[in-house]
Amino acid sequence: GVMYGVPPYGYNYLSPEPPLFATPFINAADGAQNTDPFPLTFPPHDVSAKNPDTQSFASVIPISADVSFYYRDVVPYTENFMFSFERQITAKMLLTMSYVGNQGHHILSVVSNNPSNQALCLSLSQPSEVAPGSPTCGPFGEDAVITSATGQVYHGTRMGIGPNYQEDTWQKTIGNSSYNALETNLRYVGRRSDFLLGYTYSKSIDQGSNLGEQLNPLNTETTRAISAYDMTHNFVASYNLSLPFERLFERKNRLTDQWSIAGTTRFSTGFPVTLYDDSDNSLLGTLGNGVNNYLLDTPDYSGGALDINTNPRNGRPEFNASAFSTESLGQLGNARRRFFYGPGISNFDLTLAKLLRLTESKSIEFRLEGFNVFNHAQFYGAASVDGEVNDPHFGQVVSAASPRLVQVAAKFTF
């Protein structure tokens, strides 16, 4: 594989723990001194298997938080499917129904290439199993040099690419995805009004919805779940209606003519809640490195009632947080990354417009536009619900979409 980013393969240094700005090679928490890898000596351009680089990498070993492209990566591709039919209901109304689907193959994904041996780390997490004065293994301790009670020295408990590396990842084209949807549209075009009604019923599934979501290095299929952007139901109506002020006032002139109201209304179910567990109790040591910003770990799910609350305006949690707990030591949590949904959206955007014709070629349009015009609180978005089991706000809604926005606009056409 080709590695990049951190020494000895690049000029980007990632500290193993948070440092202070003035002392970037010293851990802020415990004062531990990390090796300054700079300046680097890059190998010559003619390095090959027959002419290897012989310089010592001792100053940068063990290499941690580095990313490599897997040597057998291939080009990702998708297969797309669509079947549609239309029916003219009346002279002014058309119904369209479609099946839309796709399959994604060889999607670029991040997976640890040096995970910790969970059973070994668990056994070395017991003080009675290690020599007096030696550190024990445990959450975030998979890279410690541990001497067992029998005198055996372990340079960490990782397995994969060897003790010269710590938590590193491959970018491998091994992901897959699927999307299937029923799409319906009803279009009406009249003399004084028109509208378009659209409804989609869909399901999207993948192993990771972005490059930051790691795959399970022990079994990549276990991370397959509904996509972070999956939306089961989505209804959108757009419409435009000419206001008959000239009929109301029985007078047609520049003041009563050319009034209209238009808008967009949307009702949809919410995005899935993504679950995290930052405890590293799994003892896999799948730490973030700037590409994968979260651990692989998810909480344990008891199987109890979720009590989904899709209307958090009542002040109750979005789901039953007590049904989840921090994962058991030495075991990945049994909860899937995503399997239930957050609050949806019900939103109205409206525009009141008046076109004033000045001459045959010149006109001014005045618009009064309101977004979320009824100021309905929308607890909607991929990160609107706290899914980190160790956070004090776990299960709570923590963000909302924008409140009502009103603006006035004018457009001069000539």
Image: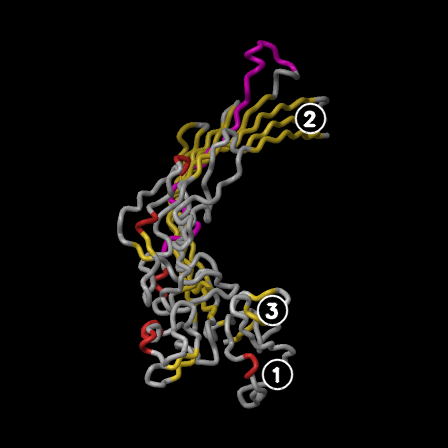
Q: Is residue 171 left or right of residue 14?
A: left
- Is label 3 in a helix, a strand or a loop? strand
Tell me which numbered mark, 1 or 2, is placed earlier along the sequence: 1
Amino acid residing under circle 3: Pro
Check disc 3 and report the residue beneath it.
24
Point out the frontmost of discs 3 and 1. Answer: 3
- Determine the residue positioned at 62% across, 64% down: 21
Residue 347, image x and y in percent?
A: 47, 34
Region in magenta: 225-253
Q: Residues within 10 Å of mark 3 (few under 14, many from 20)?
A: some
Amino acid residing under circle 2: Ile
Check disc 1 and report the residue beneath it.
43
- Determine the residue positioned at 38% across, 66% down: 216
Point out the frontmost of discs 3 and 2. Answer: 3
Residue 311, image x and y in percent?
A: 39, 37
- Determine the residue positioned at 50% across, 73% down: 64
Check disc 2 and report the residue beneath it.
364
